[in-house]
Image (cartoon, rainbow, N blue to C red):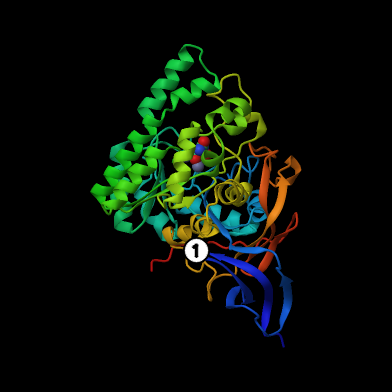
Amino acid sequence: MSLYDLLIHDGILVTSNGAKYADLAISDGKLVAISPQLTGSASEEIDATGLHIFPGVIDAHVHFNEPGRTNWEGFATGSRALAAGGTTTFCDMPLNASPPTLDAASFALKREASEAASLVDFALWGGLVPSNIEQLDELAECGAIGFKAFMSNSGIDDFDAVDDDTLQRGMERAARLGKLVAVHAEDDHLTTKLAREAIKKGQTSVRDYLQARPVSAELDAIQRAIGIAEATGCSLHIVHISCGAGISLVAEARARNVDVSCETCPHYLVLTEEDMERMGAVAKCSPPLRIKAEQEMLWEHLRMGHIQTIGSDHSPSPTTMKIAQSFFQVWGGISGCQSLLSLLLTKGHHERNLPLSLLTTLTAEAVARRFQLPGKGKLVIGADADLALVDLQAQTILHTEDLHYRHQQSPYIGMSMRGQITQTLLRGRTVYKQGQCSTQAHGQLLTPQRR
Ligand SMILES: NC(=O)NC(NC(N)=O)C(=O)[O-]
Ligand SMILES: [Zn+2]
Ligand SMILES: [Zn+2]
């Protein structure tokens, strides 16, 4: 009679407090013992000598476009890419699927699709658009982790942006429901005006796109979103901040006890506008990639603990949508969810000496805490055995064929990575090992549990 289902020997556990040698014992999908030299028997044993064991990454910002647009990605390919990158939980954004997640019916459709196909666990964002304020209650009832709103054009016709009045009404409702609101913070008036003027003059290059989405448009929107959150008492999460001053605005608001958190994305940390000019559409996103000085400020803010989460903002499209005469016309979104952890290990830990404990906080522990995902994000007894086994010594080049996305495009192809994910486990089951993904869809819906 085995004492445990699984014993993982001699790994180096990475927690928010640091790294330590310990064995892990797992039964019924949970961590049941964590200690060096664990004794006892198990149905399965893994020798993790020389490997670091991270809590599975929680990527709170992906667009997997299912139902309705599985020719863009879908839960099967998206979750395979996540598993290959050491991610064991994702939060799917309410837009780019069709229908968008704006009410109980569309939430149920998405939940059913993900349960049928996802290799990893998932939570779902609801949307906040002008037409669905009355449906926020039912979305909360379904277990949405929060409501996502766009302050600028979302780039897709079936998900409208909100003006400040609508955002305020949505935040008032969300505050009453005890739900968080996340915003895409760019000022719609300025970005629309600048784009229209450029296009009118036939100025539609990458450089013209960059100039049409200035940092000032992002700062203006961040400032307004924080003001509305402060006025309504709504919890606010600002996604994909691309600039140092944007993080500073959040840090100042947090210092005056506003319940606001922020996210940045790997592409703002490892790429710049020069990469966007060199690579073109595969590196197009909004807010756009910024200058090197902004990137360095983001790393400094990361080090100082001013950024709460890192999300991939994986927003793929068919390759045909990445081809257009005008750069304003190509799809804005970067495919990168498979590379989140390895990029942070390469550019953060290896090249900038960021401690592994900080990376664990940013990619797992703080994410689970912010979105109230119990049992996730920490290597503690009783937690789900969601694990990423990583060979920190390995050095690899990311090849096109390594990508599990439906469309194998990414700005990271050809990049030298340190820290190879060798095996990923979801609640004690292997979902990825040395290039091979599991074929079993065991992903479960996670709903926020207030402490
Ligand atoms: N409709 C989208 O997927 N938009 C996304 N596109 C980006 N970031 O370029 C986003 O998160 O804003
Ligand atoms: Zn966005
Ligand atoms: Zn997004």
Residue 429 in the image: state x and y as whole percent.
67, 68
Residue at the extreme top: 201
Q: Quadrant of the N terminus?
A: bottom right
Q: Which residue is mark 1?
A: 16
Q: Is residue 174 above or below residue 73?
A: below
Residue at the extreme bottom: 1
In terms of secondary structure, where does tag 1 sit? loop
Q: Quadrant of the C terminus?
A: bottom left
- Residue 27: name its quadrant: bottom right
Q: Is mark 1 within 8 Å of ligand 3?
A: no
Asked whether residue 142 is in view, the answer is yes
Residue 294 in the image: state x and y as whole percent.
45, 35
In the image, 175: left or right of 157?
left
In the image, 146: left or right of 3?
left
Q: Is residue 129 above or below residue 174?
A: above
Q: Residue at x 73, y 79 (%)?
A: 43
Q: Residue at x 73, y 75 (%)?
A: 45
Task: Give the amino acid type for the residue marked by disc 1 in the picture.
Answer: Ser
Residue nearest the viewer, comparing 65 with 432: 432
Q: Residues within 10 Å of mark 1 (few under 14, many from 20)?
A: many
Q: Residue at x 58, y 25 (%)?
A: 277
Residue 420 in the image: state x and y as whole percent.
69, 54
Residue nearest the viewer, comparing 305 with 253: 305
Residue nearest the viewer, comparing 30 with 279: 279
In the image, 427: left or right of 208?
right
Q: Residue at x 63, y 74 (%)?
A: 24
Asked whether residue 102 is in view, the answer is no
Q: Is residue 402 above or below residue 39?
A: above
